[in-house]
Image (cartoon, helix red, strand yellow):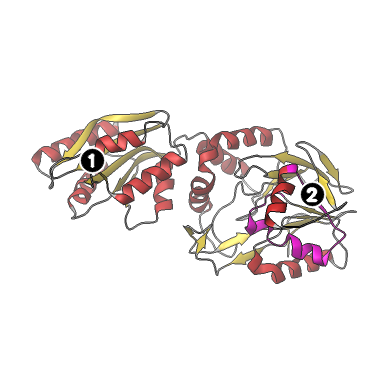
């Protein structure tokens, strides 16, 4: 239990047992499932935690309550890493009123068959207020950030914004690591598709005087909030966070890798502010996705494979287009021994993407890098530097 303000306490847990978050994202430094409680004339608990930490969470809550009984459980998000303990909570505190919106309670019935809350249910609307005594809460709906039922809560007394999954990151709270790196990978992996909805949320947040952000994952944010809000604005508007070039490649026998590394060398020699490069078959795909969104320019280097493209590159491009990849300059290095089609396939995969500027130069290798390819790579590097 940790004090956030005089009346607000953190009662969440750290998970160092999890290997894949949401079944796909590696979390080498674990995960935090955050939960909070406001102690006032009436007591409000914000969200529960993952089912593997029931006892620890209920113990943290009991300590914070100091013998009192909660009046409200506010359910901001129904993903099971936050909602799994609703029934366990009700077994301990059966008289507590569950607060949610209409979509929250529809989902609750999906997760907990036969759940009948009776008169212990308070359905709220966007902008509706709830008084706890000295603390007044306002509910801020944020549909598709990143589920349809998501709502956030603003405490106007302590100027605290309970932001559900927004402003969250991978990593347990007992880990000391750069916030932006794991928040960026988290954002683009999980929320990236919903930029328009995040922009709508940021407009709502701009009307609030916020001094503290309490997300459902990652640390409580208290200082330099403009930094975090600014990154979310850049990410959700699909802007350029860092000037530079990201080169993503797949290579069967090393020739496409040689071309990608030669391009990286040329860009570095020409003074490119940042050159990042990744072998998509060997590096964390989610990190490659975040780098593609982070930098203003992307180069895709891959082989023709079964008259298509190499599987890891196909997976990568699908990850980008599913997340509304846009507003970027993209170059291609293709390799094909007898019928190169990679460039055509790649451009077709981005057909529905907005504001993709293709470089004039496409490097086309037939098996091995030759003098003409070196010249093409030089030209491509010059074009990317403009």
Q: Is residue 94 magenta?
A: yes
Disc 1 and disc 2 in contact, CB within 8 angstroms: no
The quadrant of the rendering that contains the C terminus is: top left
Q: Look at the image and tell me whether residue 243 can be seen.
A: yes
* Between marks 1 and 2 in the image, the one whose residue lies nearer the viewer: 2
Residue 307 locus on image (x, y percent): 23, 43
Q: Is residue 285 magenta?
A: no
The quadrant of the rendering that contains the N terminus is: bottom right
Q: Residue at x 80, y 68 (%)?
A: 62
Circle 2: element type: strand
Outermost residue toward the left in this view: 371
Q: Is residue 283 left or right of residue 210?
A: left
Tell me how far mark 1 sits from mark 2, CA to CA: 54 Å
Residue 104 locus on image (x, y percent): 72, 47
Q: Residues within 10 Å of mark 1 (few under 14, many from 20)?
A: many
Q: Earlier in the sequence, mark 1 or mark 2?
A: 2
Q: Residue at x 88, y 64 (%)?
A: 68
Magenta segment range? Answer: 76-102
Residue linked to disc 1? 333
Q: Quadrant of residue 138?
A: top right
Q: Residue at x 51, y 36 (%)?
A: 234
15 vs 212, nearest the viewer: 15
Circle 1: element type: strand
Q: Is residue 81 left or right of residue 313?
A: right
Q: Residue at x 88, y 59 (%)?
A: 95
* Residue 99: numbered disc: 2
């Amino acid at each position: 239990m940790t004090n956030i303000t005089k009346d607000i306490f953190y009662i969440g847990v750290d998970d160092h047992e999890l290997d894949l978050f949401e079944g796909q994202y590696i979390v080498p430094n674990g995960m935090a499932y955050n939960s909070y409680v406001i102690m006032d004339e009436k007591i409000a608990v914000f969200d529960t935690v993952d089912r593997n930490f029931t006892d620890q969470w209920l113990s943290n809550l009991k300590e914070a309550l100091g013998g009192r009984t909660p009046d409200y459980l506010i359910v901001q998000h129904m993903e099971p890493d936050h909602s799994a303990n609703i029934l366990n909570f009700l077994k301990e505190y059966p008289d507590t009123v569950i607060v949610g919106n209409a979509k929250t309670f529809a989902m609750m019935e999906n997760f907990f068959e036969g759940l009948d809350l009776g008169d212990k249910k308070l359905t709220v609307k966007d902008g509706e207020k709830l008084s706890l005594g000295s603390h007044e809460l306002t509910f801020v709906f944020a549909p598709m950030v990143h589920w349809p039922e998501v709502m956030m809560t603003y405490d106007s007394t302590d100027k605290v914004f309970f932001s559900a999954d927004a402003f969250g990151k991978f990593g347990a709270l007992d880990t000391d690591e750069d916030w932006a790196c794991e928040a960026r990978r988290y954002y683009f992996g999980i929320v990236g598709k919903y930029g328009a909805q995040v922009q709508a949320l940021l407009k709502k947040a701009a009307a609030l005087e916020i001094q503290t952000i309490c997300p459902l994952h990652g640390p409580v944010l208290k200082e330099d909030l403009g930094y975090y809000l600014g990154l979310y604005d850049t990410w959700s508007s699909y802007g350029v966070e860092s000037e530079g070039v990201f080169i993503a490649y797949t290579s069967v026998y090393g020739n496409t890798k040689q071309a990608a590394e030669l391009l990286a060398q040329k860009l570095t020699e020409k003074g490119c502010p940042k050159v990042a490069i990744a072998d998509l078959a060997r590096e964390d795909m989610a990190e490659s996705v975040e780098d593609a969104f982070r930098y203003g320019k992307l180069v895709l280097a891959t082989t023709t494979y079964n008259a298509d493209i190499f599987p890891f590159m196909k997976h990568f491009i699908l990850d980008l287009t599913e997340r509304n990849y846009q507003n970027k300059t993209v170059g291609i290095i293709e390799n094909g021994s007898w019928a190169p089609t990679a460039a055509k396939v790649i451009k077709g995969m981005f057909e529905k993407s907005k504001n993709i500027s293709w470089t004039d130069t496409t490097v086309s290798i037939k098996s091995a890098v030759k003098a003409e390819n070196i010249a093409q790579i030089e030209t491509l590097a010059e074009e990317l530097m403009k």
